[in-house]
Image (cartoon, rainbow, N blue to C red):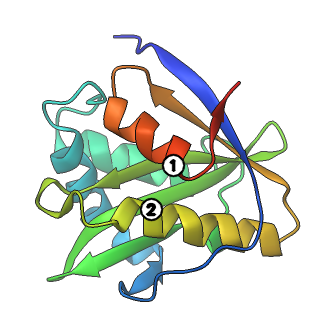
């Protein structure tokens, strides 16, 4: 099923980083945790594409192995609580610009500021790496995500 998505961009700059959450870089050892959270967080939403854990794992491996352009490991993070990846952001270089390939939060962790923390951390790292802008595509019907991105300075292009 094709999703109706819109493109949003944001100029990069130094970000104030919330130190309340322990933000970790993603390693290959984290792929199963990340796939489990991906599947659980998207299940039953407008953004659900994977039906099984194997499909979610395949998608995570594709992202980390440059399947959507070069993976930017220094700007991709997750927040872990209770040995669970409760929030994840993956960044790839797409058309010479950093792209938020994935951003998701486990259902039991929504509305705790985790997505904002991860986005700001990624934006800060990308700015330090010399990038000027970040891009994402968001499902039009995902109104809460659109509002969050706008709050963080993203605009529709």
Mark toward the viewer: 2 or 1: 1
**Residue 31 in view (yes/no):** no
Q: Position of residue 15 (x, y in %)?
A: 66, 73
Alpha-carbon neighbours of circle 1 within 10 Å: few (<14), some, or many (≥20)? few
Verify CB contact (< 8 Å) between mark 2 and mark 1: yes
Q: Which is more toward the observer, 13 or 80? A: 13
In this view, 132 is above or below 18 = above
Identify which residue, 58 or 76, lies in the foreground.
Answer: 76
Give the mark count: 2
Examine the rendered structure and indicate whether residue 110 appears above or below residue 39: below
For the C terminus, the quadrant is top right
- Residue topped by disc 1: 151
Which residue is painted at 17% across and 39% down in the image? 52
Q: Check disc 2 and report its element: helix, strand or loop.
A: helix
Residue at image coords 69%, 39% = 9
Label 1 residue SS:
helix
**Residue where numbered disc 2 is placed:** 116
Label 2 – label 1 distance at C-alpha: 9 Å
Q: Measuring 38% from the left and 87% from the top, which residue is drawn there? A: 22
Q: Is residue 124 above or below residue 81?
A: above
């Amino acid at each position: 099923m094709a999703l109706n998505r819109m493109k949003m961009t944001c100029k990069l700059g130094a970000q104030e980083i919330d130190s309340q959450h322990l933000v970790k870089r993603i390693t290959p050892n984290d792929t199963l945790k990340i796939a489990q959270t991906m599947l659980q967080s998207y299940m039953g939403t407008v953004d659900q594409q994977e039906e099984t854990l194997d499909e979610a794992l395949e998608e995570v491996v594709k992202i980390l192995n440059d399947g959507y352009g070069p993976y930017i490991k220094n700007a991709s993070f997750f927040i872990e609580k209770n040995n669970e990846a409760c929030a994840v952001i993956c960044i790839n270089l797409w058309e010479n610009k950093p792209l938020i390939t994935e951003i998701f939060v486990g259902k039991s962790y929504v509305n705790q500021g985790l997505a904002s923390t991860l986005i700001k951390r990624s934006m800060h790292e990308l700015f330090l790496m010399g990038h000027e802008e970040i891009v994402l595509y968001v499902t039009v019907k995902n109104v809460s995500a659109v509002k969050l991105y706008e709050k963080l300075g993203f605009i529709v292009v």
